[in-house]
Amino acid sequence: MRFTSRYAAYQELRYMAKAEVGYRTKTVCELTGVQRNTLLAWERRYNFLEPRRASNGYRSYSEQDLAKIRAVKAYVDKGIAVSVAVAHVLAEGQPAESFGDVAQEGLKGKHGELLEALVAFDRSSAERLIRGTDGLPYEYLLTELFTPVLVELGTGWADGRYTVAQEHFASAFIRAQLIAILLRLDGGPESGRGVVCACTPGDNHELGLLMVAIRLAMRGWRITWLGARMPEHDLVDFVKKRPPELLCISATVVESARELVAFVERVRDEIPRSVKLVLGGPGVPEDLALDGVEINPALALI
Ligand code: B12
């Protein structure tokens, strides 16, 4: 074989070496930015990668595998569920950019229809509408469908247009949908990095935190859901016995910022330092800064 330059020779040999041995898991993670546990969970659950085994038993991924992983990650980073992303990559479907347009088009006006059905206590129309969104990325259901309904409900309840019964019925329906999404995404005890999600002891608002949990599950996190009104002692006890990588605490209604700070500081002091503590939600004062606590971070960075 003759090469026109040393660089071309190097490229060719590099290519041949790759074809022979492929990429090891660690290299794939470095090149794609996908965490090892996430990669293995994707591989196991969605069966879209075909790593060979090198003679030493290590996984060996091909260039095609690498391209698929990058493409799936590009979808997932846009908030699209892994299962939907894989289906698109395998079918070489729409590029990630146009998927959002399709979803937004499919959801146009739907939050108004959903709200109307819910405040009329019309569960079957609401369920039909939800079935019609099958296959759309979860991120769009959260931002374009459920959140606007909840915000409008809260405004309508506060100014007396909706009764407590309407607001409770509607938020219970949305809660059920969010839990169903979470159950579909969460891989159970064996897979992914662990995160515990809980609300502050006095807070019943768990829908925002459920959306956070869904977004984390889409990124491969395994969720332990403790939910509303989590008593301090039980939370600390739970985290000490089964330390997760991440503890997410959500605060919506805060009667006293001082009490919130004292609560979070006590939790921080009592749980292992290895547990990353994240505090978020609309009840957290904007300028709050606490040692060893991340406040309202962008989830993509977690
Ligand atoms: C549904 C709802 C309820 C339901 C909750 C049901 C449930 N299982 O969660 C119920 C009926 C229990 C309820 C009760 C009450 N509610 Co209410 N409720 C709402 C409503 C309509 C929606 C809340 C919601 O889900 N928002 C949508 C989510 C997606 O947004 P979010 O919470 O901001 O979350 C996002 C971010 O903040 C962030 N985030 C949230 N948590 C975390 C955590 C981490 C770690 C991170 C990183 C990010 C993060 O990510 C989320 C997703 O993007 C709001 C109206 C509104 N405008 O929000 C009122 C609202 C929050 N409620 C209110 C009130 C006053 C109450 C009550 C006191 C009413 C009463 N008199 O009894 C009680 C409080 C009970 C208690 N102690 O908790 C007020 C709060 C006012 C205030 N600033 O204090 C609101 C704003 C209504 C209003 N317009 O007045 N409520």
Image (cartoon, helix red, strand yellow):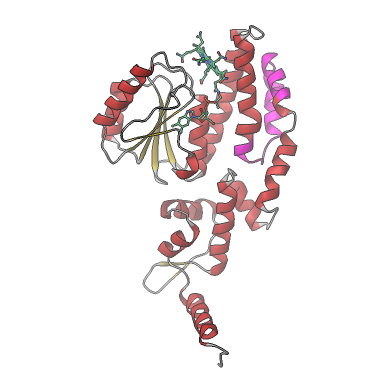
**Number of on-image labels:** 0
The secondary structure making up most of the magenta span is helix
The image position of residue 218, as x and y in percent, is 52, 43
* Rendered position, 140 above or below 4: above
Residue at 27% x, 33% y is: 271
The image position of residue 27, as x and y in percent, is 43, 64
Q: Quadrant of residue 137?
A: top right
Extent of the magenta region: 112-140
Residue at 55% x, 30% y is: 178
* Rendered position, 269 above or below 86: above
Q: Is residue 2 left or right of residue 269?
A: right
Does the magenta run of residues contain 136? Answer: yes
The N terminus sits in image quarter: bottom right
The C terminus sits in image quarter: top left
Does the magenta run of residues contain 262? Answer: no
Residue at 43% x, 63% y is: 25
Residue at 74% x, 37% y is: 106
* Rendered position, 91 above or below 289: below
- Return the residue nearer the eye: 52 or 114: 114
